[in-house]
Image (tube, rainbow, N blue to C red):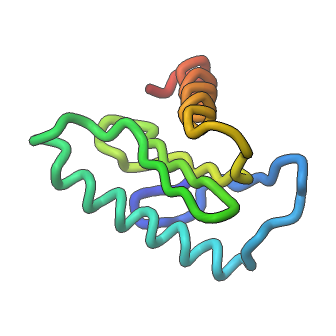
Amino acid sequence: MVDSRGKILFSDYGHSGSPALSRPEAEDLLFRAAVRMGTRKEFAEKFGGIVYSLTEYGSIVQYSIPLDRDAKAFLFVQTAKMDGPAHTRYMTIDKIRDVLKKHGYG
Protein backbone atom coordinates (compact mmCIF):
# COMPACT_ATOMS: atom_id res chain seq x y z
CA MET A 1 0.00 0.00 0.00
CA VAL A 2 1.44 3.35 -1.05
CA ASP A 3 0.54 7.00 -0.48
CA SER A 4 0.39 9.63 -3.23
CA ARG A 5 4.09 10.47 -2.71
CA GLY A 6 5.19 6.86 -3.17
CA LYS A 7 5.81 6.24 0.55
CA ILE A 8 5.25 2.59 1.43
CA LEU A 9 2.47 2.33 4.02
CA PHE A 10 2.37 -1.47 4.11
CA SER A 11 4.26 -4.18 2.27
CA ASP A 12 4.00 -7.96 2.11
CA TYR A 13 5.16 -10.70 -0.20
CA GLY A 14 3.08 -13.62 -1.41
CA HIS A 15 3.91 -17.28 -1.53
CA SER A 16 7.22 -16.88 -3.36
CA GLY A 17 8.60 -14.81 -0.50
CA SER A 18 11.45 -13.47 -2.59
CA PRO A 19 11.20 -9.88 -3.81
CA ALA A 20 12.45 -9.20 -7.33
CA LEU A 21 13.78 -5.76 -6.36
CA SER A 22 15.94 -4.44 -3.54
CA ARG A 23 14.25 -2.11 -1.03
CA PRO A 24 15.69 1.06 -2.69
CA GLU A 25 14.62 -0.20 -6.13
CA ALA A 26 11.13 -0.98 -4.83
CA GLU A 27 10.86 2.48 -3.26
CA ASP A 28 11.93 4.07 -6.57
CA LEU A 29 9.41 1.96 -8.50
CA LEU A 30 6.61 2.94 -6.13
CA PHE A 31 7.56 6.62 -6.22
CA ARG A 32 7.34 6.51 -10.01
CA ALA A 33 4.00 4.66 -9.82
CA ALA A 34 2.71 7.43 -7.53
CA VAL A 35 3.86 10.09 -10.00
CA ARG A 36 2.04 8.29 -12.83
CA MET A 37 -1.08 8.01 -10.67
CA GLY A 38 -0.85 11.75 -10.02
CA THR A 39 -0.64 12.39 -13.75
CA ARG A 40 -3.74 10.26 -14.33
CA LYS A 41 -5.60 12.20 -11.64
CA GLU A 42 -5.23 15.34 -13.75
CA PHE A 43 -7.60 13.80 -16.29
CA ALA A 44 -10.02 12.17 -13.83
CA GLU A 45 -12.49 15.05 -14.04
CA LYS A 46 -12.71 14.71 -17.80
CA PHE A 47 -12.76 10.90 -18.00
CA GLY A 48 -14.17 9.91 -14.61
CA GLY A 49 -12.37 8.56 -11.57
CA ILE A 50 -9.43 6.22 -11.85
CA VAL A 51 -10.51 2.60 -11.47
CA TYR A 52 -7.10 0.97 -11.82
CA SER A 53 -3.95 0.99 -13.90
CA LEU A 54 -2.33 -2.12 -15.35
CA THR A 55 1.27 -2.39 -16.53
CA GLU A 56 2.40 -5.58 -18.21
CA TYR A 57 6.05 -6.52 -18.55
CA GLY A 58 7.56 -9.67 -20.07
CA SER A 59 7.34 -11.69 -16.85
CA ILE A 60 5.14 -9.69 -14.45
CA VAL A 61 1.94 -7.69 -14.31
CA GLN A 62 1.55 -4.68 -12.00
CA TYR A 63 -1.77 -3.24 -10.84
CA SER A 64 -2.18 0.21 -9.24
CA ILE A 65 -5.60 0.58 -7.61
CA PRO A 66 -6.70 3.78 -5.85
CA LEU A 67 -8.06 3.20 -2.34
CA ASP A 68 -10.05 6.41 -2.26
CA ARG A 69 -11.79 8.75 -4.68
CA ASP A 70 -8.90 11.24 -4.67
CA ALA A 71 -6.25 8.52 -5.15
CA LYS A 72 -4.34 9.75 -2.08
CA ALA A 73 -3.36 6.14 -1.42
CA PHE A 74 -3.31 3.15 -3.68
CA LEU A 75 -2.70 -0.54 -3.62
CA PHE A 76 0.19 -1.69 -5.78
CA VAL A 77 0.12 -5.39 -6.68
CA GLN A 78 2.82 -7.13 -8.65
CA THR A 79 2.23 -10.70 -9.80
CA ALA A 80 3.90 -13.20 -12.08
CA LYS A 81 2.51 -13.13 -15.58
CA MET A 82 0.27 -16.12 -16.17
CA ASP A 83 0.20 -18.12 -19.35
CA GLY A 84 -3.09 -18.10 -21.14
CA PRO A 85 -5.48 -15.57 -22.60
CA ALA A 86 -5.23 -11.87 -21.78
CA HIS A 87 -8.63 -11.95 -20.05
CA THR A 88 -7.00 -13.74 -17.08
CA ARG A 89 -5.34 -10.42 -16.17
CA TYR A 90 -8.74 -8.82 -15.90
CA MET A 91 -10.02 -11.72 -13.81
CA THR A 92 -7.14 -10.97 -11.40
CA ILE A 93 -8.12 -7.30 -11.15
CA ASP A 94 -11.72 -8.34 -10.47
CA LYS A 95 -10.54 -10.59 -7.62
CA ILE A 96 -8.42 -7.80 -6.13
CA ARG A 97 -11.32 -5.33 -6.36
CA ASP A 98 -13.67 -7.86 -4.72
CA VAL A 99 -11.28 -8.17 -1.74
CA LEU A 100 -10.98 -4.37 -1.50
CA LYS A 101 -14.78 -3.96 -1.52
CA LYS A 102 -15.10 -6.63 1.16
CA HIS A 103 -12.80 -4.52 3.36
CA GLY A 104 -14.53 -1.21 2.70
CA TYR A 105 -12.52 0.18 -0.21
CA GLY A 106 -13.99 1.00 -3.60
Report the residue at 89% width, 57% height from top.
17
- Asked if 101 appears above or below 38 in the picture, the reply is above
Q: Residue 73 at x, y = what percent?
A: 44, 49
- Asked if 8 appears above or below 28 in the picture, the reply is above
Report the residue at 16% width, 39% height from top.
47
Residue furthest to the front: 85
Report the residue at 66% width, 82% height from top.
24
Q: Quadrant for the C terminus, please.
A: top left
Q: Residue 64 at x, y = what percent?
A: 49, 49
Q: How many marks?
A: 0
Position of 39 with respect to 20 (left or right) is: left
- Asked if 27 appears above or below 52 in the picture, the reply is below
* Residue toward you, 24 or 89: 89
- Asked if 34 appears above or below 102 in the picture, the reply is below
Report the residue at 44% width, 72% height from top.
32
Q: Residue 71 at x, y = what percent?
A: 35, 46
Q: In which quarter of the image is residue 39?
A: bottom left
* Residue toward you, 25 or 90: 90
Residue furthest to the left: 46
Position of 43 with respect to 23 (left or right) is: left
* Residue toward you, 18 or 80: 80
Q: Residue 95 at x, y = what percent?
A: 62, 26
Position of 104 with respect to 49 (left or right) is: right
Position of 11 with respect to 94 (left or right) is: right
